[in-house]
Image (cartoon, rainbow, N blue to C red):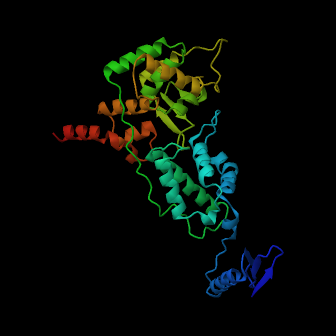
Amino acid sequence: MASFDKRESGWWQAKVRRRGYPTQSKTFATHLEAEIWARKIESDLDRGIFQSASDAEKTTLSDLIDRFKKEYAPFHYRKREDEKEAWRFQLARLDSLIGKYSLAAIDQKVVGAYRDLRLAGNSQMPAVGDSTVRKEIFMLSKLMKFAQIECGILLPRGNPVDNVRKPSEGKGRERRLTKKEFTLLETEITKSRNKMLYPVFQFAIETAARQNEILSLTWQHVNLDRKFALLKETKNGEERAAPLSSKAVDVLNALPKPKLPGKRNPTDRPFPIDRTCLLSAFRYACQRAKIQDFTWHDLRHEAMSRLSEKNDFSILELASISGHKTLQMLKKYTHLQAEKLAAKMG
């Protein structure tokens, strides 16, 4: 049964009570609007299709982001000392542009408008690329799933991201160094005042490991006799054993020995260098070598390309070395594998 009360403010509060269901209430500017809403609720109750969206209406995206940071992020994202994780920037951008919206108000139009604004930019905010916007929209989708599954919030339209066109994934970087460029860069790296830069550079080329995987490695997870390193801090959260080439083993053996006699502390890192210092030293080395458009992450592509060119590894073996979770991520190296298969076919 529905009841209507006029508040001192002049607004009308409608209440619908039904046995076996929590009381539903909402406030409207006019009595007519309150009646229309109440009839809709009663009709849905009669047909057994009623679902309350009150939590979605009361919760803003900003509220949800706060909960996400406290209840989800600490258990699913690696924490970096400088707190420059990509997910933080994605949440901050979503919060600044659509954080004031209630979850019930975020529909396909809102998501589409957000996408278009980020791609086009405006006088206060520069445009960004397809890949960046795509990641932000997928973060919004993750937030909505968090609301539904972890918070028990019913979204009246479901996840609004599902039916919105996403920007293209974009072509992955394929920047490689020429032999001359590699020699110039290697020379400048050896001249760097940061004496840890060259060992890390060599290790990256030999293992195709990601930057964080290398910097977080500890001696207790290095087995020089069996030639592998157990990488704990991986991108997908699943540890993997990375094989060590003879040169990678030589790099580790050549690292400074402990000042005090005895074995190395198992918890010490082979490469005790801060991420910011590493990238800064590498960037200056690239500048001195006059090499443009080459990032530290491009070393991973360089390493994988070199392994592929050896024609000794299958795609599955390359995935095992690199830690790529899907073979789709290795498709840029399949043309090299095709050459190997053609040679086998005769």
- In this view, the residue in front, 283 or 260, is 283
The image quarter containing residue 304 is top left
Residue 199 visible in the snapshot: no
Determine the residue positioned at 56% across, 67% down: 158
Which of the pair 254/324 is nearer the observer? 324
Q: Position of residue 65 (x, y in %)?
A: 65, 53
Residue 248, position as x, y percentages in the image: 46, 23
Q: Is residue 99 left or right of residue 181?
A: right
Q: In which quadrant of the rendered view does residue 151 lie?
A: bottom right
Q: Residue at x 67, y 74 (%)?
A: 52
Left or right of 44 in this view: 230: left
Q: Residue at x 62, y 58 (%)?
A: 146
Assign the C terminus to one quadrant of the image.
top left
Establish if 175 lies above or below 115.
Answer: above
Q: Residue at x 64, y 37 (%)?
A: 83
* 199 shown above or below 74: above
Outermost residue on the right side: it is 8
Residue 261 drawn at (x, y percent): 66, 12
Residue 275, percent from left and from top: 57, 27
Quadrant in which the N terminus is drawn: bottom right
From the viewer's side, name the closer residue of 221 and 274: 274
Quarter of the rendering containing residue 321: top left
Count of marks placed on residues: 0
